[in-house]
Amino acid sequence: MTAGIHPDVRDAAEPVPAGFDPREVEQFLYREARYADENDYDAWEALWTDDALYWVPAGSADIDPVNQVSVIYDNRSRISTRMKQVRTGKRYAQAPPSNLRRLISNVELLRGRRNSEGGVDLEVGANFLVLESRARGNGLWGGRTTYRIRRVDGELRLVYKKVVLVDNDKAIPTMGFLV
């Protein structure tokens, strides 16, 4: 696990930190979704901080990812490795790549979270629907994402992303929409 970030540190919640404009945050989330949808992996990967964590729990939203299986539980190094694999074109589960479109809604600025650098990250919640179109048919995925966002050198960056699928207790036939 990435040092300094635990997926659900309950005692570290603070008020929404100053300096985050809701419209700017929404635009950041829309841009992150577009990069993933359009297979712009370089731009998508560049959004993440060095201490990032990307988590997709399996079976329940409240599992312990250290002791239970997750669909994805990637620190920044693993995110980079995943993107290198995708860029080779030899990730056969995504050959050819799925056509994807994400809809992000119900964006809420939830709270602040202390980070290992002594600052406060913004925690944001949003609902999503993803349409995946492949030769074998279409799929629709829905759920709730929790993001933690940090301003680095004046730019918003992604520190943490937890994707809880509505049907995370069922088998996932494809993971292309998760990047």
Image: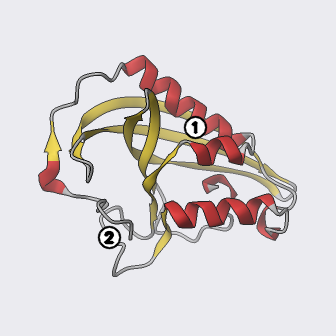
Q: Estimate the x, y position of residue 146 in percent, counting from the top left.
A: 38, 46
- The residue located at (87%, 57%) in the rendering is 96
Which residue is under mark 1?
Answer: 32
> Of tags 1 and 2, which is closer to the observer?
1
In this rendering, is residue 108 above or below 96? above
Q: Amino acid at mark 1?
A: Glu
Residue 87 appears left or right of 34: right
Viewer-closest of 45 and 130:
45
Picture disc at residue 107: none
- The residue located at (30%, 64%) in the rendering is 62
- The residue located at (41%, 48%) in the rendering is 159
Q: Can you see residue 175?
A: no
Q: Quadrant of the C terminus?
A: bottom right
Q: Estimate the x, y position of residue 168 in percent, counting from the top left.
A: 47, 63
Picture disc at residue 63: 2
- The residue located at (77%, 67%) in the rendering is 93
Q: Answer yes or no: do the residues labelled 1 and 2 have beta carbons within 8 Å?
A: no
